[in-house]
Image (cartoon, rainbow, N blue to C red):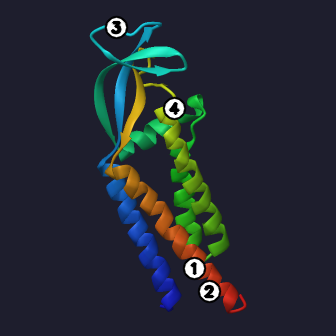
């Protein structure tokens, strides 16, 4: 096996392992909200989103797989496509494995850019149930989120370095 091929395999395996762990551990912390209207009830802490008061009733943590599924299924309804970063990550693994470094750079870059839409959930309330009674807002990022980012950034850096080396050798 060529040394470059070994590097690619090690990078992809590292990324896959980080990603698998990210799916299993808590990734995001949500405030569970209900619409309070124009005034915050006295016995609740409230957040204001789009000039509407939402009372914080509790907090819940989502594992990475829950965040991913919610993002893929419901994200487009809120114009949030962060969940689709996973599809670009998977495609990046495949094209890097077949040594298409330039395409891999594009896929990993798009994945990285899409992850930034996660921060939109701090300022936009999102429905947390099918009846749109329970709402949520992002309270904080947890270990799974950072592992997910690492699973994207590590192969991106490797692909960029391997492509630079390829160009320096006249390829």
Q: Nearer the viewer, mark 3 or mark 4?
A: 3
Query: From what the image shows, is residue 109 above or below residue 166?
Result: above
Question: Quick check: 77 above or below 57?
Answer: below
Question: Is tag 1's residue or tag 4's residue first in the polypeptide sequence?
Answer: 4
Position of residue 137 measured from the top left corner of the image (x, y, whole percent): 42, 29
Instruction: Identify the element where label 2 is drawn.
Output: helix
Quarter of the figure with residue 43 = top left
Q: Which residue is mark 1?
A: 161
Res 98 visible: no
Front of the two marks 2 and 3: 3
Which quadrant of the figure contains the C terminus?
A: bottom right
Using the image as rendered, state which of residue 74 and residue 35 is in the foreground.
35
Q: Is residue 130 visible?
A: yes
SS class, disc 3: loop
Q: Which residue is mark 3?
A: 41
Place of residue 119 in the rendered image (x, y in percent of width and height, measured from the top left)? 50, 41
Asked whether the beta carbons under mark 2 and mark 3 sit within 8 Å of each other, the answer is: no
Q: Is residue 44 above or below residue 70?
A: above
At horizontal 67% and vertical 72% (from top left) the residue drawn is 102
Comes first in the chain, label 1 or label 3: 3
Mark 2 vs 4: CB contact within 8 A = no
In three-dimensional space, the C-alpha distance between marks 1 and 4, rounded to whole angstroms, equals 36 Å
């Amino acid at each position: 096996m060529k040394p470059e091929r070994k590097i690619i395999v090690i990078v992809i395996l590292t990324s896959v392992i980080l990603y698998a762990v990210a799916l299993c551990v808590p990734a995001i912390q949500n405030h569970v909200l209900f619409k309070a209207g124009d005034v915050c009830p006295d016995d609740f802490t409230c957040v204001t989103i789009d000039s509407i008061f939402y009372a914080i009733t509790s907090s819940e943590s989502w594992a990475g797989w829950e965040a991913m599924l919610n993002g893929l299924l419901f994200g487009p309804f809120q114009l949030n496509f962060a969940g689709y970063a996973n599809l670009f990550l998977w495609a990046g693994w495949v094209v890097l494995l077949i040594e298409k470094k330039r395409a891999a750079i594009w896929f990993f870059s798009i994945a990285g850019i899409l992850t930034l839409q996660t921060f939109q959930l701090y300022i936009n309330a999102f429905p947390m149930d099918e009846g749109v009674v329970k709402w949520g807002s992002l309270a904080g990022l947890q270990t799974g989120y950072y592992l997910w980012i690492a699973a994207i950034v590590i192969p991106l850096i490797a692909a960029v370095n391997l492509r630079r080396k390829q160009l320096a050798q006249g390829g």
